Amino acid sequence: MPTDSAITLRLHTGGHWREANVMQRNNKAILGLAVVMLGGLFVLVTWPGSVPVNVRVTSRQPAEILDDAGAEMTLVTLGISRSGYHESSVYFEPHSIRVSVNVGGRWLELSDSPSVGAVGPSETKEVDVLMPSAATLCRIHLLYAGASIPWRAGAELARLGIKLPPKYWAWAGWPRAEGAHPRWRGAEIEVPLRVASASGSR
């Protein structure tokens, strides 16, 4: 099947009419499609959104470790999940997750800095955090980002069967989908320190 077609244009220049053939090629259509997708992706990436993940306590048990005051610590497992309604993963800055706990009405920041990496749609990652047994609430402070615009554009073109060269993926940030210089956003999630059932999570 031919991939090129010609359109004849009549142009009036220098007092004379001239004919010019304009070739329409598939690669131009592809380029136009890429530009449209990049514009749409820019809106999606920069549009302000809600907190990208849900956090719940999946287990809480004695740690058999004493703090400086001689009180026993508790090992709390936090489940960090992303709803299946989302179609893409969310990425966290390495070791950016900070945990604060409320003990007797006072907030204390813990020394532990759990690392999650990335959480995909319908996925749950679990992290263990050592905290005082008397803690009743915890706050999760995190920095997150979506995949970069070049990464998403490349992924969309790949779905159309268009293979991009390794140099493109290196420029897009490979192997980090969020890119070499992500637009990190901050979020804070407050979680009661009681074990939640899986059916009660969103």
Image (spheres, rainbow, N blue to C red):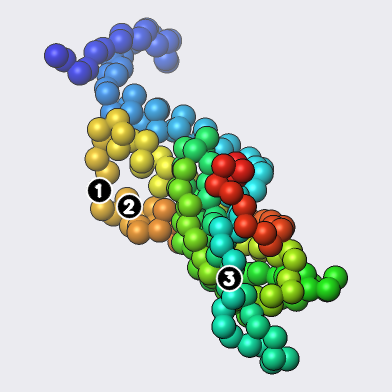
Residue located at (24% from left, 13% from top): 5
Query: Which disc is residue 169 wearing?
Result: 2
Q: Is residue 99 left or right of residue 137?
A: left
Query: Where does residue 195 sit, x and y in percent of width and height?
Result: 62, 57
Indicate the amino acid at tag 1: Pro
User: Which amino acid, mark 3?
Assistant: Gln
Residue appearing at x 74%, y 74% in the figure: 134
Q: Tell me which numbered mark, 2 or 3, is placed earlier along the sequence.
A: 3
The residue under label 1 is 165
Cα separation between marks 1 and 2: 7 Å
Is residue 147 visible in this depiction of the protein? Answer: no
The percent position of residue 111, horizontal first and vertical second, equals 63, 80
Residue occupying image coordinates x 68% and y 62%: 193
Query: Are circles 2 and 3 on residues that touch, CB within 8 Å?
Result: no
Mark 1 falls on what kind of element?
loop
- Check disc 3 and report the residue beneath it: 61
Is 112 or 175 nearer to us in this picture? Answer: 112
Q: Are marks 1 and 2 in contact (CB under 8 Å)?
A: yes
Label 1 to label 3, Cα distance in Å?
50 Å
Crowding at label 2, few (<14), some or many (≥20) Cα neighbours within 10 Å?
some
Is 57 on the left or on the right of 135, as rendered? left
N-term-proximal mark, 1 vs 3: 3
Q: Quadrant of the rendered structure where residue 179 is?
A: bottom left
| Mark 2 vs mark 3, CA separation in Å | 44 Å
Tag 2, which secondary structure? helix
Res 154 quadrant in image:
top left
Q: Is residue 136 left or right of residue 18?
A: right
Identify which residue, 96 or 109, lies in the foreground: 109
- Which residue type does callout 2 highlight? Trp
